[in-house]
Amino acid sequence: MIGTGHFSAYLTLLLEGAAITLELSLGALILGTAGGVMLGLLRTTRIRALHALPLAYVEIVRSIPFLILLFFIYYGLPLALNTDIPAYPAAIAALSIYCSAYMAEVVRAGLQSVPPGQAEAAAALGLRYRQIVRLVILPQAMRLMVPPTIGVYISTIKESSLASVIGFVELLGTGNEIRESNAGRGTGGALVFVAICYFVICFALSRLGRSAERPRAGWAR
């Protein structure tokens, strides 16, 4: 374990790494959620010709290990495009793609869980399809999408630790650098601190999700 003196010296570096992880994850979650909503809406649209492309995207991304996806973007695309892709854009792109595929299924399932009678009643009142989705279906579906969305977010945050494999120094990368640069000096506590940080982030997010569910439970009663 890290001694008191060593820990105080490395604490700032580890906290900076945690901040970088949060920044990376937040960017990926925003982009991934936006992409997932669009893909999910396409999966449920009445135009069947638009179903195939998002379906193929979701199935392919969900069937590929995230590490392979990360390697493809960081190593494969530069070869195909004859250019360099820095570690940060590669990491945030891979995480966004990963998040969007899973969020697309969350959105699709949420939209399809709303009883068809709701849309039929809205259509009978003269609302257009976009208005029905925005004013009738989405507000009800969002209540049901909170738990799986939190699960996708937590999974994306944990997968962000793999960005260290391509040389991006975030929380885990910082912990590994401390451990490798101080071999034999009892720096195993750095990785313990890294694990604690991930636990705190993910646990706080799960508690936030539970808090968001409470109004729905009360409303249902």
Image: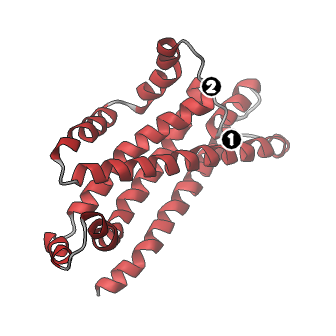
Give 37 or 49, whichever is nearer the viewer.
49
**Residue at x 24% of width, y 64% of height:** 129
Graded by Cα atoms within 10 Å as few (under 14), some (14 to 19) or many (20 or more), the crowding at tag 1 reads: some
95 left or right of 174 in image:
left
Percent of width and height locating residue 3: 79, 42
Which amino acid does the dot numbered 1 rest on?
A: Gly
Which amino acid does the dot numbered 2 rest on?
A: Pro
Residue 73 visible to an observer of this rendering? yes
**Residue at x 42% of width, y 45% of height:** 99
Q: CA distance from mark 1 to mark 2?
A: 30 Å
Q: Quadrant of residue 184?
A: top right
User: At numbered mark 1, what does the secondary structure look like: helix, strand or loop?
Assistant: helix
Percent of width and height locating residue 71: 48, 22
Residue 183 visible to an observer of this rendering? no
Say which quadrant the C terminus sits in: bottom left
**Residue at x 50% of width, y 12% of height:** 79
**Residue at x 35% of width, y 58% of height:** 148
User: At numbered mark 2, what does the secondary structure look like: helix, strand or loop?
Assistant: loop
Q: Check disc 2 and report the residue beneath it.
A: 86
Of circles 1 and 2, the one toward us is 2
Q: Quadrant of residue 133?
A: bottom left
Give whichever of discs 1 and 2 has the lower sequence position: 2
17 left or right of 91 in image:
right
Percent of width and height locating residue 217: 34, 80
Q: Vertically, is 120 above or below 147? A: below
Q: Check disc 1 and report the residue beneath it.
A: 189
Say which quadrant the N terminus sits in: top right
Q: Vertically, is 184 above or below 53? A: above
Percent of width and height locating residue 94: 48, 34
14 left or right of 123 in image:
right
